[in-house]
Structure formats: structure tokens, C-alpha cells
Image: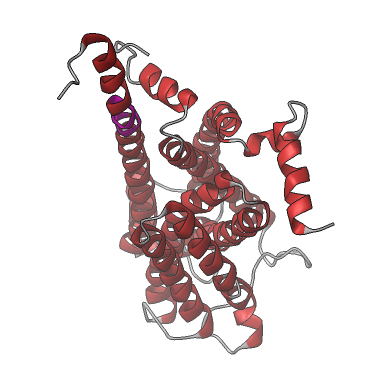
């Protein structure tokens, strides 16, 4: 099947009222995300409260590091999300470039600031953790340098998309940067195995049992879910704003904006 | 309960600036992001309404004749 034919088939699916594909249509996307985002926000608040309590009151001190190790409960989830957000950006970039769906590009745009936030938090908390445990805020080791590069990739993406006036060109240029830059993500993840780094290896991985006490692992998972939920809520909200602005001249967008502004003006 | 007192809790074993500096900045950035998002949302609503104002004005102009040269 040729790409054009595949796109045509996809567009037909998007118009079908029974297919999940219909949420690629801006109006349907706006409706669905409006329903979903508050649930993720509520879950995030709840999980942050539980996770924060567990991190500070249930988890024991570390036998070597004492209390400062508690930074791990924000540092590791932030670092994970910083990588996942970038991969998600690349994913939506690929979807946008192949299917030509506008909403996919806007999802990528919406992910960038939140990914950059987590990337900065990972670097910041890492520095504050490094000083008392390694004696330095920063070292140019492979893990830290590649994580810093990730921050620059996020900032570069945001700057690139903003610099290009024409939205469609900005979408495509951003998608290409996201796809090419995603090569950095496995480099960050495996850097502690590939090179001799000051940064320690993974304490929790999918393939082997964690090298931490159960209460610590569970706390970290709750905090990770909290950070996930927060990110999903924020990204969906941001994407909604972007979709509404992009579709400003569509009838539904105008009506939504008027209704939400108080709707005293005639729709 | 893990802590002997609230002051022991806040002291974090003598590492208070590092621990609270980490969580404080993370929390502050999340709150900042939520605030910026709210601002962006309001600006978006205003921009969408404004983007359509031109077309309404000309619509109205057709009826009232105000748009004439």
C-alpha cells in the first residue's frame, strides 16, 4: 500500500464515529482531553500526597547516606519522565510526519516544556544530591553530560518551533529534531553501563530485582506514578490550548472560546 | 513514626538545604508551570475570540452599513 493510500485509509478511520482514530480530529481530541485531564490531575495530587508521606515518614534512613538519599524519590522519577517525554515527542513527531495529523504535532509541542521541567529537576536534584555524597555538584561524566544535552535538546526544540512562523513548517522541523535527538535517550539510560561514570548504576530496572528495600521501591513507584499523572494532565491541558489556537477559525473553536470566556458575547 | 521530633524532621540529618532545596525547587517549578498554563489558556481563549472578531465585524457591517468606505 502506498503512503498516500495509507493516509487516505487513516483519514477515513478518523472520520468514522466508532473508531479510536476519530480523536485525531481536533474537535474530538479537545472533547476527549477535556474529560481526561482532570482525572489525571486529581490522581497526581493524591499520589503526590501519598508518595510524599511515604518518602518522608515511612521510608527508613539509608544506612550509608542517612537522610539525604530521600532526594531519590523526586530525582529518579524526574529523570525517567525527562526521557519518556522526549521519546513521546519523537513518537508524536513520527505519527505526525507519516499520517499528517495536526494534533500529533501539537502533542509534541505540548510535551516539550514539561519534559524540559523534569530534565531540569533531574539535573538540579542530582547536583544537590551529589555535593554531600560525592563532594561535587557536577562532573562531566557520561550520565550527567548526556542529561544536560537532553535539556539543550528540549530548549532547542522549543526555540526552533517558536522561531518558524509558518505552523506547518514549524511542526515538521520540530518533529525531525525530536526524532533525531531521541538517539540521546538510550545513551543517557545506558551511559552508566557503557562508561565508567561517577553516577551510580540503576537501582531499579525492568530486568532484575531492585537493590533497594521494598518500602523504598514502592515509594519510588508511587512518586513515579504521581509524576506521570501530573505530566499527562499538564501536557493534555497545554495541547488543548494549542489545538484551540490552531483551530481558531473553526466554528467549534470559536464557540468553545466564547462559552468559556463567560459567553456574554453573542456566539 | 520515623522522626523523633519535628525539628529532627526539618533538619534532615544535617542535610536540610540539599533535601529541601531539591523538593522545594521541584514543587515551585510545578506550581509555576500550572500558573503559566492557566495564563496561556486564558490568553488562548481571548486570542480565539479576537481572531474571529474581524469576521463578525464585517458580518455586522453588511447588515448595518458601518463597514462602508
Give the residues drawn in magenta, as a range.
B46-53
Residue at 51% over, 48% down: A106
- Is residue B54 among what the camera can see? yes
Q: Quadrant of residue A264?
A: top left
Q: Single out the residue that lies furthest toward the bottom.
A: A196
Quick one: A49 or A264, which is closer to the camera? A264
Q: Does the magenta portion include B47? A: yes
Residue A183 coordinates in the image, percent (x, y): 61, 75
Residue B50 coordinates in the image, percent (x, y): 28, 29
Quarter of the rendering occupied by the C terminus of chain A: top left
Residue at 36% over, 40% down: B37
Q: With respect to residue A65, does A138 lie above or below?
A: below
Q: Does the magenta portion include B68? A: no
Q: Please name the colour scheme applied to the rendered image.
A: secondary structure
- Is residue B1 among what the camera can see? no
Quarter of the rendering occupied by the N terminus of chain A: bottom right
Q: Main secondary structure of the magenta part?
A: helix
Quick one: A191 or A56, which is closer to the camera? A191
Q: Single out the residue that lies furthest toward the left.
A: B69
Amino acid at each position: 500500500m502506498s503512503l498516500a493510500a495509507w493516509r487516505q485509509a487513516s483519514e477515513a478511520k478518523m472520520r468514522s464515529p466508532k473508531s479510536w482514530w476519530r480523536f485525531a480530529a481536533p474537535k474530538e481530541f479537545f472533547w476527549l482531553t477535556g474529560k481526561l485531564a482532570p482525572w489525571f490531575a486529581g490522581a497526581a495530587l493524591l499520589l503526590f500526597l501519598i508518595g510524599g508521606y511515604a518518602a518522608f515518614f515511612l521510608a527508613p534512613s539509608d544506612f550509608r547516606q542517612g537522610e539525604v538519599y530521600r532526594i531519590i524519590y523526586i530525582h529518579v522519577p524526574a529523570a525517567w519522565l525527562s526521557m519518556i517525554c522526549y521519546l513521546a515527542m519523537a513518537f508524536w513527531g513520527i505519527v505526525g510526519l507519516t499520517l499528517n495529523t495536526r494534533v500529533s504535532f501539537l502533542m509534541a509541542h505540548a510535551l516539550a516544556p514539561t519534559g524540559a521541567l523534569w530534565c531540569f529537576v533531574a539535573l538540579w536534584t542530582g547536583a544537590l544530591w551529589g555535593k554531600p555524597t560525592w563532594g561535587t555538584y557536577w562532573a562531566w561524566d557520561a550520565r550527567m553530560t548526556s542529561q544536560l544535552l537532553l535539556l539543550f535538546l528540549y530548549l532547542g526544540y522549543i526555540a526552533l518551533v517558536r522561531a518558524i512562523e509558518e505552523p506547518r513548517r514549524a511542526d515538521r522541523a520540530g518533529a525531525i529534531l525530536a526524532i533525531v535527538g531521541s538517539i540521546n535517550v538510550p545513551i543517557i539510560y545506558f551511559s552508566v553501563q557503557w562508561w565508567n561514570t561517577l553516577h551510580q548504576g540503576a537501582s531499579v530496572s525492568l530486568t532484575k530485582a531492585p537493590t533497594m528495600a521494598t518500602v523504598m521501591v514502592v515509594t519510588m513507584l508511587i512518586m513515579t506514578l504521581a509524576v506521570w499523572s501530573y505530566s499527562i494532565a499538564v501536557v493534555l491541558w497545554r495541547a488543548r490550548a494549542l489545538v484551540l489556537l490552531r483551530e481558531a477559525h473553526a466554528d467549534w473553536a470559536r464557540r468553545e472560546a466564547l462559552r468559556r470566556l463567560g459567553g456574554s458575547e453573542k456566539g | 513514626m520515623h522522626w523523633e521530633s519535628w525539628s529532627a524532621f526539618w533538619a534532615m540529618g544535617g542535610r536540610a538545604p540539599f533535601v529541601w532545596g531539591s523538593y522545594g525547587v521541584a514543587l515551585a517549578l510545578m506550581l509555576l508551570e500550572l500558573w503559566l498554563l492557566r495564563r496561556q489558556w486564558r490568553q488562548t481563549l481571548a486570542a480565539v475570540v479576537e481572531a474571529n472578531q474581524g469576521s463578525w465585524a464585517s458580518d455586522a457591517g453588511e447588515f448595518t452599513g458601518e463597514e462602508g468606505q
